[in-house]
Image (tube, helix red, strand yellow):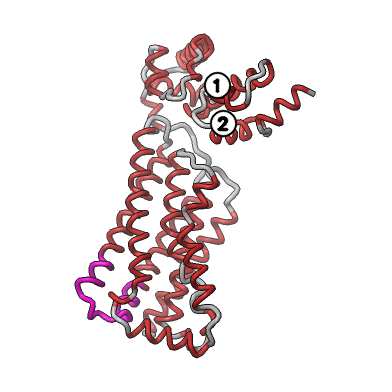
Amino acid sequence: MNPIWAGLFAAALGVAGLGLAYGLVHLRESRAPARLWALGALFAVTAGVWETWLIVGGAYRNAPHLLGLFNGALLALGPCLYLQARAVAGLQMDRWMQAAQFLPLLVHAGLLAVFLWPLEASQKRELAELSLSASGQSDWIGTAKLLHLTVYSGLIIATARQGLLRMNAQLSRFDAAELHWIAGFSAALGATALAALAVGFVAPQVAANDLNNGGSLILAGLAVTIAVRSLRDARQPPLKPAPRYARSGLDDDRLAAFARRIEAAMRQQELHSDPELTLDRLADAVGLTPQQVSQALNQQLGLTFYRYVNQQRVAAAKRLLAETDLNVLDAAMQAGFATKATFNKTFKAETGQTPTQFRASRAG
């Protein structure tokens, strides 16, 4: 390998490793789910750089059994960025659906376990040599990975847009900027994947070695980009109310009055029981603007709109579970939750108990 390229690889892996380590140290800070998926994306890209370096740099000749160890890592990049976008936007997804995002990675790992890992060292070297001399179009597995990444790029952009549209009034400036960054990064990622696909089909005579060389530098750049972002985010101080409130002209007395009006409306009209309740609907019900409702909840109660509504729904569900014979699902629906899965997750997060455990403790 060219010494300059080797230096770039070493620098990329060093920065990526630093970002990964620093992010793990700060994983327990706020927004941990989003941080976890960001670290997953960083690990996926770093593993991809390592796998590519084994082949392009010729390291496979001395360590053939390392071939394929991280071969499918890039199949985790799209899902990790997608789940990070959902976490930042506050869009929930149950654990089974999260796990399903990594099904292609598991299938790929299974194929490697059956067809690649049992091979002898000499056979692995031959496969590596073949992959370097083959044309780009012949690598159907690589094509499938690029298509997978392209599809997820579209999903990520759509998710970021959905989060910005649905939660614009509640998102902090930091979270909004994070969504914009994820969307922009994914758009660049998708464009790169499409360009690689185009080269493979339009110019099949291009050797896979040339594609690997270009792809290696791109992967190194991605690793550095995510690592630097991870380092910056890890040092982000605790979120404070968005600066936009400073221009609203509302003092504490007016905000306290607004908060009382909101709480009275929620109690008297049982607005929480509407599973489609939005910030705009709540604002209409209390005769305020969405901005005023959001500011009152944030600065007087220390809650976002969705956290406040969920707390109201959990409180209503607790009353129903303690004072009626309704089953858990009916209690959840009557309290305003759209699904039982969301109810169970939110109830456990707010009370530390499952609905069934709460009812049993009350009965005892």
276 above or below 228? Answer: above
358 above or below 86? Answer: above
Image-quadrant location for residue 364: top right
* Side of 41 relative to 139 (left or right): right
- Residue 80: x and y in percent read 46, 54
Say whether marks 1 and 2 touch (CB < 8 Å): yes
Question: What residue appears at the point 46 percent right and 74 percent down from the top-left corner?
Answer: 51
Could you say which is closer to the camera, residue 362 or residue 327? 327
* Side of 138 relative to 104 (left or right): left
Question: What residue appears at the point 39 percent right and 40 percent down from the top-left corner?
Answer: 176
**Span colored in magenta:** 195-215
Kind of residue at badge 1: Ala
41 above or below 351? Answer: below
Residue that label 2 marks: 343
Question: What residue appears at the point 47 percent right and 60 percent down from the top-left corner?
Answer: 42
Q: Tag 2's secondary structure?
A: helix
Image-quadrant location for residue 278: top left
Question: What residue appears at the point 44 percent right and 54 percent down from the top-left corner?
Answer: 79
Q: State whether residue 110 appears in this view.
A: yes
Which image quadrant: the N terminus?
bottom left
Task: Indicate yes or no whether the magenta region holds residue 205.
Answer: yes
Query: Which residue is at the far top?
Result: 268
Kind of residue at badge 2: Phe
Q: Tag 1's secondary structure?
A: helix
- Residue 77: x and y in percent read 43, 59
- Residue 341: x and y in percent read 55, 36
Residue that label 1 marks: 335
